[in-house]
Amino acid sequence: MGTYGSNTIQRRFGSWTTALERAGLKVYSYQMAAAARNPENRYSSNQQIFDDIIRVAKLLSIPTITTGQYKEHGKYDVSTILNRFHSWDKALKLANLSETGFAKDISDPDLLFEIQRLWIKLGRQPTTTDVKKGLSKYSLNTYSWRFGGWREALEMFIKYINADENNSNNSDNEKIPKEERITHYVPQETEKKTVPLHNTNRDPNYRLRFKVMQRDNFKCCICGTSPAKDLSVELHVDHIVPWSKSGETVIDNLQTLCSKCNLGKGDIE
């Protein structure tokens, strides 16, 4: 019911308890309200709480759970658990589950790459529901703590993808310095065939791959299949003019193909 998100408040003050204290409110009133809603929480043993956390993880078939997932499926009030164990990650650790992903060694590129992986896998913009279902390697809270919220995380991702968009297509893939270019020889019977020199690397980088799929609406350019309709569909980025025939790795020479069409195209060529 508030104007600001709880994650924003916790990031600013370090914890919800600290925010209550700074606002001149009595901290115990929040804890007592939780106990009043679920009186049995105060008398539950640690093991009972651990067992219920594990139960929810098994119910969702994921290695760990966030506070949001536990609120939806758990028996005990999250505030009671946080008050007893001081942090959600500590409660997970004591329950022999992996932490939710607040580890400081997770970099911004790691999180942005995970958003990209989800976007490509789903064939559409991932939602908070997708993350809560465990489709993401990291929890929703991890993105919120790092970027301020899921919407802010998506905005940061779009900025990352659109970086250098005003440059030429070649800038989307690293150019090979002229002095480092080499001629590749392909043995053919008794003679050697020289493959033309290239100005770009053969494999498109992650930013370029995403831009190609985004341009093609995350659909196969041959058969039109998309993971948005069928999660078994796997999308590839392929050269239109083959690399072996001097095709460069630039956006105008790349297309989105499903794995079946890509393999079939290879057989034809």
Image (cartoon, rainbow, N blue to C red):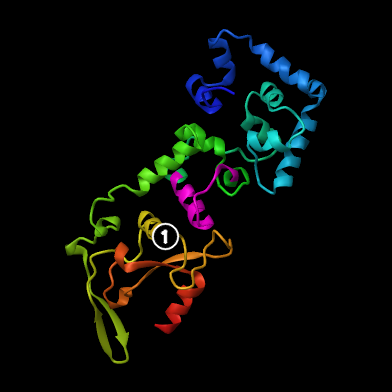
From the top left corner, tell me how far across and down residue 74 is, in percent: 74, 35
| Element on which disc 1 rests | helix
Would residue 102 be visible to someone looking at this image?
no
Whether the magenta-drawn stretch holds residue 114 is answered as yes
Q: Quadrant of the C terminus?
A: bottom left
**Apparent side of residue 54 relative to residue 260 in the rendered image (left or right):** right
Whether the magenta-drawn stretch holds residue 118 is answered as yes
Q: Residues within 10 Å of mark 1 (few under 14, many from 20)?
A: many
Main SS, magenta residues: helix
**Apparent side of residue 182 relative to residue 41 in the rendered image (left or right):** left
Please report the residue visible at 45 percent of the width from the left and 66 percent of the height from the top: 236
Relative vertical location of residue 40 with respect to residue 218 in this rendering, above or below: above
Please report the residue visible at 45 percent of the width from the left and 73 percent of the height from the top: 222
Question: In this figure, which residue is indicated by the disc labeled 1?
Answer: 213
From the top left corner, tell me how far across and down residue 21 is, in percent: 57, 11
Q: How many labels does the image show?
A: 1
Would residue 148 be visible to someone looking at this image?
yes
From the top left corner, tell me how far across and down residue 197 is, in percent: 22, 72
Please report the residue visible at 72 percent of the width from the left and 20 percent of the height from the top: 34
Numbered range of the magenta stretch: 112-129
Most distant residue in the bottom direction: 190
From the top left corner, tell me how far across and down residue 163 is, in percent: 31, 47
Nearest the camera: 205 or 212? Answer: 212
Please report the residue visible at 37 percent of the width from the left and 56 percent of the height from the top: 211
**Apparent side of residue 250 relative to residue 229 in the rendered image (left or right):** left
Q: What's the amino acid at mark 1?
A: Met
Q: In which quarter of the image is the N terminus?
A: top right
Relative vertical location of residue 232 with respect to residue 87 in this rendering, above or below: below
